[in-house]
């Protein structure tokens, strides 16, 4: 019976430690990846603000070819929205909406992951060496969600890899046109 008390005590102590550590983990997480694209900033801007073209370079499109997509609003205007629905957990369901831009240097989108949280995504596009330096970023605040804060520890390695893949595809699509 003493071993059962020790196991229960150890488990309670472990939970308390995880909760306390979680309180000190960062609430906010930001991920950024950059690439140089041999295309004019306006061409990059046009491509990323036209959500009808997003799946040409999306790192997630190939994960579920049977996912359903719905696009609303006008390309390049505030409120332009891409919603997706997938049964595969790697893709999930949600939407992204164009909320702010400053052509051709900045684009901001609101991401909504269908009840699993919200985040911001953005592109910074700078003219450089006859082309564009493009940064794709992601920012979220987990607030008091302690599980989310633990997930945030791995966000850069997971999402960063996907953003690198998406930027490489964007580069290929834009440079093929040039």
Image (cartoon, rainbow, N blue to C red):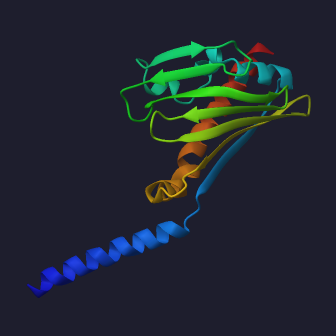
98 or 44: nearer the viewer: 98
* Residue at the farthest bottom position: 2
- Which quadrant of the view contains residue 160? top right
- Which quadrant of the view contains residue 103? top right
Numbered label tally: 0
Q: Point out the image quarter for the N terminus.
A: bottom left
Residue drawn at the location 51% of the way across and 68% of the way down: 23
Query: Is 26 left, or right, of 104 in this rendering?
Result: left
Residue drawn at the location 55% of the way across and 40% of the way down: 118
Q: Point out the image quarter for the C terminus.
A: top right
Please, is residue 70 above or below residue 14 in the view?
above
Query: Is 100 left, or right, of 30 in this rendering?
Result: right
Please, is residue 12 above or below residue 96 in the view?
below
Residue drawn at the location 66% of the way across and 19% of the way down: 80
- Which quadrant of the view contains residue 106? top right
Residue 12 percent across, percent down from the top left: 29, 75
């Amino acid at each position: 019976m003493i071993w059962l008390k020790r196991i229960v005590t150890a488990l309670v102590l472990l939970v308390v430690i995880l909760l306390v550590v979680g309180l000190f983990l960062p609430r906010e997480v930001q991920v950024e990846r950059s690439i140089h694209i041999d295309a004019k900033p306006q061409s990059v801007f046009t491509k990323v603000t036209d959500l009808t073209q997003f799946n040409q370079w999306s790192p997630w499109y190939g994960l579920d070819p049977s996912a359903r997509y719905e696009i609303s609003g006008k390309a390049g205007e505030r409120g332009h929205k891409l919603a997706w629905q997938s049964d595969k957990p790697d893709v999930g369901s949600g939407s992204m909406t164009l909320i702010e831009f400053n052509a051709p240097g900045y684009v901001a989108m609101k991401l909504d992951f269908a009840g699993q949280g919200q985040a911001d995504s953005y592109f910074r596009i700078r003219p450089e060496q006859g082309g564009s330096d493009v940064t794709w970023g992601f920012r979220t605040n987990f607030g008091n969600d302690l599980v989310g804060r633990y997930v945030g520890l791995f966000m850069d390695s997971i999402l960063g890899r996907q953003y690198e893949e998406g930027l490489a595809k964007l580069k290929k699509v834009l440079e093929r046109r040039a």
